[in-house]
Image: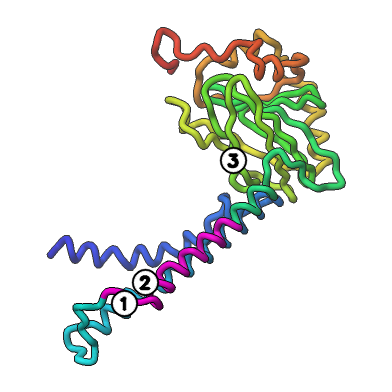
Amino acid sequence: MPARAAMWGARPAVFLALPTLAACTGGVLDPHGPVGAADGTILIDSLVIMLAIVVPTIVATFGFAWWFRASNRRAQYRPNFVYSGQLELLVWGIPALTIILLGGVAWIGSHALDPAKPLQSKVPPLEIQGVSLDWKWLFIYPGQHVAALNQLVIPAGTPIRFMLSSASVMNAFFVPQLGSMIYTMNGMTTQLNLMSDRPGEFRGMSSHFSGDGFADMHFQVRALPPDKFVQWVSATQKAGPALDEAAYHALSAQRANVPPMTYRTVADGLFRDIATQKLPPGPGPAGGAPAP
């Protein structure tokens, strides 16, 4: 009895918490760009389509339980009932239509949101090269000859063309509010096109388990007005260390909770050398154990 009373006493708190959950922001249902908005539309459309089965099934369950209750003498008991064409059409037809509609949504979305497909914009795209390490993210701006660690600064309203690779194990790049997730793999590159349609700050993360420091492998994304982005690039070019092969080799060692920092200059072709494994993958744990 005490356990049952505690369970019923906790239920009002759960219902009171629901409105606060409705105000949560920062996820896929709070998009800040065309790709994120399209992803959100696909999720909502898929939910509505699946409710075409879920809602009638729930209603029918309660309806059958009420109609065939022991006190209802109008309910007919038919022990020899075997087949009904109408029921077969209903049972198979609705799921088939649901699968067709979900397949159509997935088919259209997979082509419209092809990660390598450039975004339509009058503004030329900005190229950023991203590298996943243990356990941090390195972003190289080849046109600006600067780099940033565990932070991603982009101009709002400008398409971003990502070239992504891994300096260690397979990982996954994901900024939920901007859109599609894509994997990074050692020895190859993947492409992703995203854009933030307005200034803001977002959470970027690794969404694929990659070892002991995975839980802290996230980064801040700042979408700045174009003039503020130019100012950030100018300030970055005047401060911080240089990212050459020696600095990259030290950076590739396993380490978690690395504070964000910037590099004032980057060695030419560094990303190409990482992706083609001219620069060897990260050394991994020293002596068979992860670094503290």
Marked residue nearer the N-terminal end (1 or 3):
1
Q: CA distance from mark 2 to mark 3?
A: 34 Å
User: Mark 1 and 3 residues: CB-CB less than 8 Å, in contact?
Assistant: no
Tell me where residue 163 appears, x and y as whole percent: 70, 30
Q: Is residue 265 left or right of residue 139?
A: right
189 vs 29, nearest the viewer: 189
Which quadrant holds residue 206?
top right
Q: Is residue 9 left or right of residue 192?
A: left
- Mark 3: which amino acid? Met
Tell me where residue 135 appears, x and y as whole percent: 52, 25
Tell me where residue 14 appears, x and y as whole percent: 36, 63
Residue labelled with disc 3: 181
**Res 259 seen here:** no
Location of the C terminus (image quadrant): top left
Which quadrant holds residue 242?
top right
Looking at this view, name the residue that lies furthest to the left: 1
- Mark 1: which amino acid? Phe
Residue 97 magenta-highlighted: yes
Residue 12 magenta-highlighted: no
Residue labelled with disc 1: 62
> Please, what is the dominant secondary structure of the magenta stretch?
helix
User: Mark 2 and 1 residues: CB-CB less than 8 Å, in contact?
Assistant: yes
Residue labelled with disc 2: 58
Q: Determine the residue positioned at 48% across, 14% down.
A: 284
Front of the two marks 1 and 3 = 1
Q: Which residues are magenta?
A: 82-104
